Structure formats: C-alpha cells, structure tokens
Image (tube, rainbow, N blue to C red):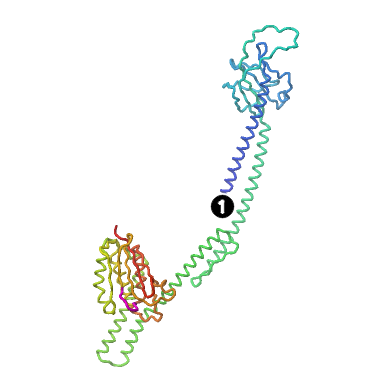
Amino acid sequence: MLGTGGGALLVLAICGWLLDRMLARSLQVDFDARLLDEARTIATLIEFEEGEVHSAMADHEFPQFQPSPRSAAWQIWRTADNRLLGSSAGSAPSMPQPTVASTTPAFGDQAFDDGRPGRRVWFTLVPVIEPPDPEDDEPPETVEAGEPPEVTLVLARDTLDLQAIQAKVRRMLGLVFAVMTALILATLLVVTRRTLASLRELASTLNRIDSRELPTLEIAGGTTEVQTVVDRLNGLIGRLKLAMQKEREFTANVAHELRTPLAGMRSQIEVALLSPRDPAAYVETLRRCAEANAQTEAIVTELLRLARIDAGLEVARCEEFRLDKLLEDIAREFSPIARTAGRTVAWQVDAPLNIVSDEGKVRVIVLNLLSNAVEYSQGPGPVEVSAACENGVARLVVANPCKPFANGDLDRIFNRLWRGDEARGATGVHAGLGLAICRELAHSMRATLTASCPRPGRFEIRLELPEKK
C-alpha cells in the first residue's frame, strides 16, 4: 500500500515536471515568434541610400528601444567584414557578431550588460534602396552607390516577463502537487488504519480458533485486500474441515474394521475356556482365531500400504512390458479363485500391447479389480476383462453384473473404508481399501482409474495407461 502511494506521488511528480517543461517550451516558442515579428518590422526600416546603410528608426518612435531599465536593443552588422553599421539608442548590450549568416532566422539566449536574461534573433537581409524624393526641387548629386551590401540584423529583448509567468506556473504546479500529496497521504493514512484494524481483528479471530471448531471468518468493514485474504483463509478452513471430517470418519471406520475380527477372536477364546473340550474343538477354535488374525493382519497391511503411498514411498518404476502377457499370467493365477467363487471370467485382450509402466503395481491393481468383481457380482453373467489400445492409450476394463447403485454411491466407490453394504456383512473379507489403493497406485504411475455404470446392471472400472510409442 505504501508502495502504491509512493508510486502515485512519483507519477504525479513526473507529470508535473513534464507539464512544466511543456509550458516553458510553449511560452518560449510564443516569445520567439513575437520577437521575430518585431525583428521583421525593423528589417523593413533598414534602407540603402547614397551608398550607406542606415535605419529609419529615428523617424519612428519605438518606446521599447528608448533608454530604460527594460529597454530592448538592435544592431545591424555588415556581413562581409563584420562591421557594426548601427544600433539602438542608449547602452546597447554586448551582442557578439553571429558566426553563422543565413536568411533563416536563428534564436539564442542573450545576457544584457546589466545582468538581465534575454533572448535574441538574427538573420541576414539586403537593405531596401531608398528612392529619390519627387518633391525635392534640387536634383540629387550623382553618387555611385552600387549594389546594397548584405547585412545581419540582431534583435534582443529581456525575458523577465517570461520568467515571471514561468515562476507563477511553477508555483501553481507546486501548490497542486502539495495538495495532491496531502490528499494521497491522508487517503493512505485512512486506508492503512482501516487495514491494520481489520488485520488486528483477523489476528484476534485466528487466535481464538482451536482444533475442535473451525468457524468461518467474517471481518466487517475490511478493505478489498483484507477481504481477499479472509476469503482465502475461509477456503483453507473449509478444506481443513473436510480433512478433519474425513480423518474422524477414517478413524471410526478403522476402529470398526479392527474391532470385528478382534471381537470374534475374543468370543472364540472365551467360549473355549468355558468348559473342558476335546483336542479337536480346541484345534477348531485356534483355526478360527487364526482366520480372524489373518483378517486383521490384512487390514493393517493395506493401511500401511496406503500410508506409504501417502508419504510418497511407493515410487513407480516404469519399464516397458507387454500388458497382454501380464494378463495371461493373471488369468492362469486367478482362474481357480473365480471357479471357487462360482464365477467365470471372460477375457478379450488384443495382442501385442506394449506399455511403459510399473508392472508390479499394474499386477496389484488388476488382481484387486478382479477380486472385487468376483466378490460383488450380482446376477447372471461372467466377469469380463478387455484390453485394447485406442489413440495411443492402453485401456483395461473390468466389468461385472451388479445391482443398481444408490444415489451417490458411485461417487464414493474409491473412498477409503467404504462399502456399499450398510450392515458390513462382508467385514473381514473386504475392508473397503482395495479400490482406494488401486486409485493411489494408478496416480503414482500417472495413470487414470475411473468407475461407471454404462447401463443398468453393469459396473465397469477402467484403467488407462500410456502405450509404448
């Protein structure tokens, strides 16, 4: 803000200086024009008579050339030998003979003998030949006059009036600059006080915020700049609220997911301890506890993997490989799992499909997508896997039959610890982290993972990878 005020004052000062220069130049041009008109009037009075150059100024009254403290001065020089032929009455100033003779008027500064500043103009001319007087009864003597010589007329006048006008203009400009400076400083003072008051209020409001509540900031009477900061802070607070809400939901979901298998293990152990049992019953109890423990370990492993991805520790190691060959290996590995679940997988893969990506991460994503498709397929029809290249992008699509999604469920499909079953009947089998891990792994490889329902009863997840050029 102070920089803006300083810049405004600098611009104002520059504009004032330029205006002063323009006015001074305009006044000097006008002064020189009037000085030239006066010199041309005098030039008409320079005559050549009887072989001599003289001026008829004596026959005319020009008050400005009469001896006085402000008198002007003129001089006539013969150009050929630089001889002074005539000058104004009184004390003529020291006006040196012009070194350049030209019929084009030239101007310059002139200092009078009494110290007055002035301007002068000079140009060359040929005097007018004085004709004989027809009323003269006596005939003139015959004189060989010859051609009139070229002379230089110099006219000088002081610039005291011009300087007085310039001084008055400068005083007016100075007054305007002083008034504008005062207005700018007053405006800056008012705006600065308002801004500082708004900032103090904002700082006080921020100081009262605790971690349990993040209110929306409201600053009354703030400047535009402060309001912009408040808007940005409110946007930040909104994002923090969303992050804190997601953190609370995530903590609650993790607690629920871990509590279920742990509670199952505890109930199995308590039942086994109620009364003596045969060894086979104890073995069955231990087997169930081992399954619950494996489920808990799987949840913790997936959480740790998400934490590594969030921390940037899961770095993609991109290399060229054939996606069609990878899918063939996965098909052989996953076929028994699909048959056990009572599902078939239909494969439609173009070959060859050369891509540049992290083969290990692509394998994890595909296995997760297949596992979810087999587990959550509802209705007749196989799980379909297709892969092809379109416009330089390798597209892998995993589709399965499904029931209609509730409003908003499709948008939350990649949320952590989210599942469509409200009762969490599948707890321990799928913790709702697989698709979240797949999306983060895809982002780490600069790939895209999207979900859609192109038609009722069909759910698709599409993975897009850049093809090897």
- Residue 228, given in percent of the width and then of the height, sits at 53, 60
Residue 234 higher or lower than 14, as above or below: below
Q: Which residue occupies 70% across, 27% down? A: 70
Q: Quadrant of the C terminus?
A: bottom left
Q: Magenta residues: mostly which secondary structure?
A: loop
Q: Is residue 262 left or right of residue 20?
A: left
Q: Amino acid at mark 1?
A: Leu
Residue extent of the magenta highlight: 376-383
Q: Which residue occupies 71% across, 27% down? A: 69
Does residue 443 belong to the magenta stretch?
Answer: no
How would you rate the neighbour count of disc 1 (Cα within 10 Å): few for under 14, some for 14-19, many for 20 or more? Answer: few
Secondary structure beneath disc 1?
A: helix
How many circles with numbers are drawn on the protein? Answer: 1
Residue 135 higher or lower than 327, as above or below: above
Pick the front one: 117 or 379:
379
- Residue identifier under label 1: 2
Q: Is residue 90 left or right of residue 203?
A: right
Q: Which residue occupies 33% across, 88% down? A: 270
